[in-house]
Image (tube, grey):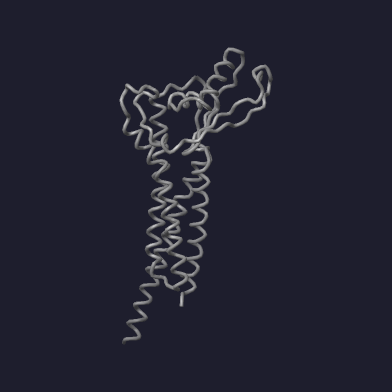
Amino acid sequence: MVDNRYATALVISCVLSILATVYLSVAVGTQHWYIYTSPSVRGESNASELRTLQEEFISGEFDEKMYSDSLFRLNGTLGLWWRCVLVPTDTHWYKEPDPKMEMECVSFTLSQQFTPKYKEPGNHNSGEDLIRTYLWRCQFLLPLVSLGLVVLGGIIGICACICRSLSPTLGIGVLHLLAGLCTLATVCCYLAGMDLLHRVSVLPDKVDGSLGWSLYLALISSPLHMMAAALLVWAARSHSQNYYRMTAYRVA
């Protein structure tokens, strides 16, 4: 028989776990981790240059400098698996006071995720930047590890419910704690990687960068996982202590 306090803690931890998993899944699948804001362009010469950047971004060869320059100049957004630019739908958009814009996105392939970063973006002769390379790899691997840990914890939890046992609750709590730490590490790796990218890249004048809502969703999911872990660990420890006390009382 499960005490009402433990049942309440388990229900709350399940709700927190589901919310955290949904937030993290949405964050991983969207591109609004970092947002660039570029000044509006006027003049046919500048428009032609931006059109070239757009074509290279969509169909050109994968190159960090190329897509970074497009992100800087075309109000780009960068996520873990997507990179997007804001482009006009009309050919003569630069003549209009308020042109209609649309978002065009390109996904990172698995091989591109493992592509090494260089000390000078785009210059393969400058040598590999190991710090940026491994920060990039960690930022897309760690959220997958986090989601995997939560799924594993959910499977164990379902089995525990079927068996009507609270014994695996401590292990499930530890899995959620590790998931929260992995998510927090993802955000840290991403922020560190973007800071290093901006140090080795030259941002055009009047281009501003800001953190997007996808990153904040991932950041929120981390403490939610940790709170779920704390409740699960408390329920497991308290139930275990009460069980031993009851056992000792019956023996006495």
Which of the pair 180/66 is nearer the observer?
A: 66
Which of the pair 212/76 is nearer the observer?
A: 76
Q: Relative to 168, does residue 27 appear above or below in the rendering?
A: above
Q: Relative to 239, does residue 14 appear above or below in the rendering?
A: above
Which of the pair 146/63 is nearer the observer?
A: 63
Q: Relative to 4, does residue 191 appear above or below in the rendering?
A: above
**The C terminus lies in which quarter of the figure?**
bottom left
Residue 143 drawn at (x, y percent): 43, 46
Q: Residue at x 65, y 20 (%)?
A: 91
Q: Quadrant of residue 49?
A: top right
Residue 226 drawn at (x, y percent): 42, 55
Residue 43 drawn at (x, y percent): 61, 13
Q: Residue at x 30, y 25 (%)?
A: 127
Q: How many marks?
A: 0
Q: Residue at x 34, y 26 (%)?
A: 119
Q: Quadrant of residue 172?
A: bottom left
Residue 137 drawn at (x, y percent): 38, 39
